Structures are given as C-alpha cells and as structure tokens.
Image (spheres, rainbow, N blue to C red):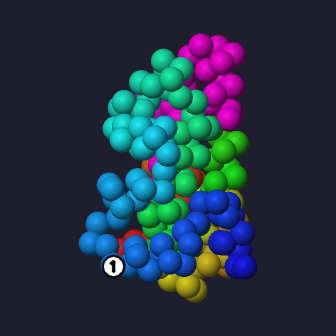
Amino acid sequence: MNDMESKIPKEWTLKPADLEDAKQQRKLAGPFIEKFLDDSEVDIIRNSSIQLVEKIKSKHYKAVEYLGRCAELFNLSNQNNCLHEIMFDTALRTAQELDDLFKDTGTVKGPLHGLPISLKDQFHVKGYDTSMGYVGWLGTYEGDKTSPKVHTVDSQIVQELLSLGAVLYCKVGLQ
C-alpha cells in the first residue's frame, strides 16, 4: 500500500470489478456513482454549495458529516490518480473546529462555513507539496529545496478560502 492509499479509508474504495465497470462509463456522476451510496448520501451530494451552507447553518448537516460524504464520493468517482495530495485528516479537524464554533457560539466563520473545497495543485497549502505537475518540485518550494517556504506558506487564495470557512480536503492534478 502506498502513502496515498493509506490516507483513504478502505470502505471508500471501489472493488476491482466496479473499477473496470467505471472505465466503461462515459459519465461517472449521477446514476452510476449513486449506486454506491445510500439515500442520505445521495441527498447530501445533490445539494448546491449554497444549499449546503444553508443546511449547515440550519443544523440539518454538520460540516464533518458533509466533508466525509464529499471525500468519499470524490474518491469513489476519481480513482484514476488525479489526487495529488489527500488532506482528509486536516480537513476533518477543520470541519470539527467549524462544527464546534457553530455549536458553541451559534455563528458561522464565514459564507463558506463547512464547504468542502478541492484545489488544483498550483496553490500552496501549509504542510503539503505543490508540484504544479513537476515531479522535481516535490519536497520543494517552486523547485527550491533550500527555501524556508517549503511546506510553510499558504497561497493568498488558500488564506482567503480558509478565512471564509472553507474546508480544504484534497489537491488534484492540473489536467
């Protein structure tokens, strides 16, 4: 098992036969992927971003619950090596902090409170690689192994998303 596979719960992966079936599909979203989900999960994923945040504010969902469903669905429908960084552990901590904030204060962090966000692998996130598709950039800051910025800075957009209450859960390829 490689490092990426170890970050994905086993129950979130497709069986080999299902992966082969997925390769034959023109469209993975909708009925194909929904057959792997229960009714409550289908209900959750059919919400728009605006509906999701409203349902978190109305206590219909918790950020942790929604994040888990999004991460599971993303993993199910994208088992084609598009994930460059899996940040589920960090994302779950962030979602729990947002749920606690809402529970304790009755207020949300911002207009994106609890919204799971995947990022292209062109944005720096503290603690994670940014390769921009270049394997030589792994473990560096834009190719510089000696930079003090390696794994220690967030891009401006990452800072903005986090300040608005977003939950960053993975980085995907640039394709």
Foreground pick, 138 / 102: 102
Foreground pick, 3 / 23: 23
Residue 163 appears in the figure: no
Tag 1 residue: 24
- Secondary structure of residue under mark 1: loop
**Identity, as a three-letter code, of the amino acid under mark 1:** Gln
Count of marks overlaid on the render:
1
Look at 32% across and 55% down and name the residue there: 30
Quarter holding residue 124: bottom right
- The magenta stretch spans residue 161: no
Foreground pick, 154 / 36: 36
Q: Which residues are magenta?
A: 96-124
Residue 175 higher or lower than 156, as above or below: below
Look at 53% across and 39% down and name the residue there: 66
- The magenta stretch spans residue 123: yes
- Label 1, residues with CA under 10 Å away: few <14, some 14-19, many ≥20: few
